[in-house]
Image (tube, rainbow, N blue to C red):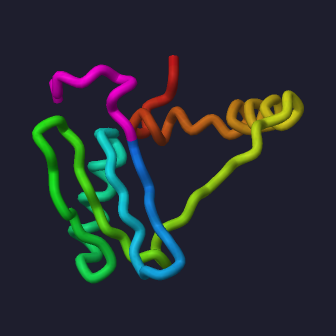
């Protein structure tokens, strides 16, 4: 979506405090907006779209107990190689190609 905003002007803010039961999220990120809209549709008692603005931003309220932040550790070279070897060993190309073998 063309918004007239530069990338550095498109932001995501997540606000919550200890006195309320909701997390307030404002974002311009398209993928996050899609995920939040889908969640709001599936769980209307837990989340809702508050507003959308003319610049492509959207504000959501999510029940505080439903929100989490996930931090992942970077892969070590050894872990990356083991994951690669496992993926090669368990090649799922047949399943991904609808049962057709790679040639």
Q: Viewer-proximal residue, 33 or 9?
A: 9
**In this view, 83 is above or below 4:** below
- The residue at the far right in this view is 78
Q: Position of residue 76 (x, y in %)?
A: 85, 34
* Left-right relation of 2 to 98: left
Instruction: Tell me the quarter of the picture where residue 42 sits.
Output: bottom left
Residue depicted at 32% across the width and 52% down the height: 26
* Position of the N terminus by quadrant: top left
Position of 17 with respect to 3 (left or right) is: right
* Residue found at x 31% / y 58%: 36
Residue extent of the magenta highlight: 1-11
Residue at image coords 24%, 58%: 37
Q: Is residue 73 magenta?
A: no
Across and down, in percent, residue 101 comes to 50, 28
**Residue at the spot 43% in from the left edge and 39% down from the top edge:** 99
Hey, which quadrant is residue 47 in on the image? Answer: bottom left
Using the image as rendered, state which of residue 46 and residue 59 is in the foreground: 59
- In the shown orientation, is residue 92 left or right of residue 59? right
Tell me residue 49's x, y (percent).
21, 63
Q: How many marks?
A: 0
73 left or right, relative to 100:
right
- The question of residue 2 being in magenta is answered with yes
Q: Quadrant of residue 53?
A: top left
Which residue is the extreme one toward the left?
54
Q: Provide the major secondary structure of the magenta segment.
A: loop
| 103 lies above or below 64 | above
Q: Nearer the viewer, residue 19 or 23?
A: 19
Taking the view exactly as shown, the residue that stands out farthest to the top is: 103
């Amino acid at each position: 979506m063309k918004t007239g905003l530069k990338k550095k002007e498109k932001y995501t803010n997540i606000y919550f405090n200890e006195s309320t039961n909701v997390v307030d999220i404002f974002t311009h990120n398209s993928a996050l907006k899609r995920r939040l809209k889908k969640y709001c549709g599936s769980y209307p008692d837990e989340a809702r779209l508050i507003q959308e603005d003319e610049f492509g931003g959207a504000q959501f309220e999510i029940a505080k107990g439903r929100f989490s932040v996930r931090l992942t550790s970077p892969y070590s070279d050894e872990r990356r190689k083991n994951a690669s070897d496992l993926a090669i060993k368990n090649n799922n190309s047949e399943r991904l190609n609808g049962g057709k073998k790679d040639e």
